[in-house]
Amino acid sequence: MTTATIQIPRESTTRMAPSRRSFADHLDTGVLRSNEISTLQINVGKLCNQACKHCHVDASPTRTEIMGREVVDACLQVLEKNRIPTLDVTGGAPELIPDFRYLVTEARRIGAKVMVRHNLTVMHESGHEDLPEFFARNEVALVSSLPYFLAQQTDAQRGRGVFDKSISALRRLNDVGYGRQAHLTLDLVYNPVGAFLPPPQAAIEADFKHELSARYEIVFDNLFTITNMPIARFDEWLHRSGNAESYMRKLVAAFNPETVAGLMCRNLISVDWNGKLYDCDFNQMLDLPIESGRPQTIFDFEMAELENRHVTTAEHCFGCTAGAGSSCGGAVAGA
Amino acid sequence: MHYYNEDDLERFGDIAKYQPHLFEKFMAWYQACQEEGALSRREKALIGLAVAVTVQCPYCIEAFTNSSLENGSNMEQMTEAMHLASAIRGGASLIHGIQSHNAHDKVSM
């Protein structure tokens, strides 16, 4: 449900109090179980050229935690041995780690589809100017954050000057074929610039396509709407701004059981820069481990032992089930 | 002591303590009005915001500001909607100046 109205009871005429029920209590079975693993999502580290206000990784230019070759190789071996179809590379800015290009080219050689969560501005950093050509040569699927089609909102979330750099980067990507050729997909990500839920994905995608085309002649494939997670840097902002309680109440009130089947944690394994395994990138940031008794690192990865596991859940999971739901691929239920 | 209490927005349902059937009818009408129809949810949220500012209801202003944001509107668009509603309200006052003109003309030589 993405229509926001006055916060009055929708299903009863009794007073709506903040829910005291846990996330697990909202599930039909009380537990969330994973299915087949189709994506290996690796977070290669917290180093980034930006320090966005909503970042759940607390990434910034001063962070030093990055994935080394040993863990990179272990990820590649898992990918190849288990024929996992998709490698999803995130960070930080993944491009900043020394082994980034090695990781991508090797994963492509193995035959995996490679997705990179590319922040657009990193291609303006010294030594990274040829990223568009590198991405195109390896047919990397790009997923890039652009919280709004106007500078004010984008810069408010991602830093001064980020919008102009992002527009310039999108033009470069279009120039090498991204968003124009079927095998070079360019998807954008919308995050709300504040303590509110995303709009219906189809509607805001149509706006972005119209505005970016009309204003800048930029094209892209899909827009994913992602809900801001009440953790890390965004959670700190929620508390500083006095929005923490009401935002959490909003997420809980918007719980949509139709999103549960499509939650990303059911089909992926998340790996941190040290090689530790998690149910998702958010659990990784909260250091909520995978169910005990299952493999805990990429070095002892066993596919059969990781499927059908009990996914670790907590209050932040309401961020993925609010309204139309939220995943790394955007909304998961009809808006 | 003040008359508006922020928490009262979430207590709106308490109105149903008396004559609940009337509140239920109101809620059904209120929610149905905001569903996607000949107008989009975004258009309806902007109309709601403009009306909220016009009737100066702080609860409605907060609710429809959030509703507008959650339907993808930005502050430029929302401010235009608020200006239009306010201009209509101002115009509605100003056109009553003709009543004054008329009254003046009636008694003047």
Image (cartoon, helix red, strand yellow):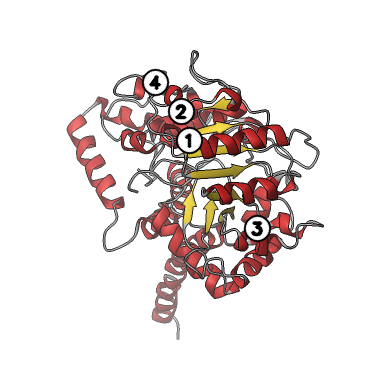
- Which amino acid, mark 3? Gln
Badge 4 vs badge 2, beta-carbon distance below 8 Å: no
Question: Which subunit holds the residue at mark 2?
Answer: A
Location of the N terminus of chain A (image quadrant) = top left
Q: Which residue is tagged 4? A: A24
| Crowd band around label 4 with a 10 angstrom C-alpha radius: few (<14), some (14–19), many (20+) | some
Closer to the eye: label 3 or 4 = 4
Question: Which subunit holds the residue at mark 1?
Answer: A
- Mark 3 vs mark 4, CA separation in Å: 38 Å
Nearer-N-terminus badge (1/4): 4
Image location of residue A20, percent across then percent down:
42, 18
Image location of residue A84, percent across then percent down:
47, 40
Q: Does A5 appear above or below A173?
A: above
Q: Residue furthest bottom?
A: B109
Quarter location, residue B43: bottom left
Q: Does A281 appear above or below B31?
A: above
Q: Which residue is tagged 3? A: A152
* Residue for point 69% across, 47% down: A102
Badge 3 vs badge 4, beta-carbon distance below 8 Å: no
Image location of residue A202, percent across then percent down:
39, 57
Work out whether residue B4 can be spotted.
Answer: no
Question: Which subunit holds the residue at mark 4?
Answer: A
Label 2 in the same subunit as label 3? yes
Label 3 in the same subunit as label 1? yes
Q: Which residue is tagged 1? A: A82
Q: Does A114 appear above or below A323?
A: below
- Mark 3 vs mark 1, CA separation in Å: 45 Å
Q: Which residue is tagged 2? A: A303
Nearer-N-terminus badge (3/1): 1
